[in-house]
Amino acid sequence: MRFSWVCRKFIRDFERVSVKQRVQNLYDKAGYGLFLAVMLGGCSVFDQIEDVDQAQLQAEAVPAPESRKFDGADCPIFFQGLASGEAQERFFEKGKCGNEAPYHVFALGGDYPVQLGPEAKLNCAMTTQLQRYFADVVQPQALRHLGQSVVKVRVAASYACRRRNGRRSGKFSEHAFMNAMDISALTLSDGRTLTVKRDWRGLGRDARFMKAINRGACKYFTTVLGPGGDTYHQDHFHFDLARHGRKGTYRVCK
Ligand SMILES: [Zn+2]
């Protein structure tokens, strides 16, 4: 059958071209790409040529989506050098969890940089508020109460696809949207580590520092929970940027 011969010749010619060139051709020449698609489609329907995996050809011809570029327009706090991290591909799972523009955040900058360990998975707004909170509240309070700065923070949780307080039903936690972070300990420049669980209690300078940074967080986050709040937060501070109330102006500060 004449059409069969045409198809075989077309596919043989097609196979001689390198994959890279095929992709380039498709990219540069939309007309040729359309012709290619019509020919391959027609050949598979009419001629049933078995030695060409059309799905494979199609997969080769479609360029992979480019990685999301890390630029300041995305999230100025990184561009300004006030946080270090990596932009990630948009990420969603289980229908509800994830974020359009996630970041892996390694450190917060400013006059007194702070390392996050392990790295936090956060959205831009949360990263921005965390940097401001550390620069405006945590470091000044550390210098005031303890005579030194905080150099490292233990991230007890950042992204987690779960509901509030780990319940099986009810509202999703802001952790599910990369809009929350839990802190369980802070390491000072002399190497000493304060934990929320141990150092919250008492009247000493460590406890005064812990309470000061818990109280001071309320200006920067819409939800602040700590040992003074409920039983779920006896060993860490929880900060998030949830929208509370109809106007979104209500704040939870415990
Ligand atoms: Zn939390």
Image: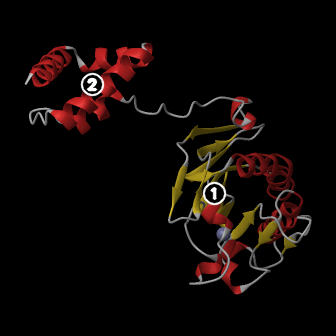
Q: Residues within 10 Å of mark 2 (few under 14, many from 20)?
A: some
Question: As displayed, is residue 57 above or below residue 208?
Answer: above
Q: Quadrant of ligand 1?
A: bottom right
Q: Where the N terminus falls, by quadrant?
A: top left
In the displayed structure, 183 sits above or below 103; it is: below
**6 or 73, which is in the foreground?**
6
Pick the residue in front: 224 or 112: 224
Q: Amino acid at mark 2?
A: Met
- Disc 2/disc 1 C-alpha distance (Å): 46 Å
Compared across the picture, whether 221 is left or right of 120 comes to: right
Mark number for residue 33? Answer: none
Question: Where in the figure is residue 39, as x and y percent of width and height?
Answer: 27, 24
The residue that disc 1 covers is: 178
Q: Name the residue type under label 1.
A: Met
In the picture, the disc for residue 39 is: 2
How many numbered marks have been drawn onto this rendered protein structure?
A: 2
Q: Nearer the viewer, residue 209 or 169?
A: 169
Which residue is painted at 78% across and 37% down in the image?
111
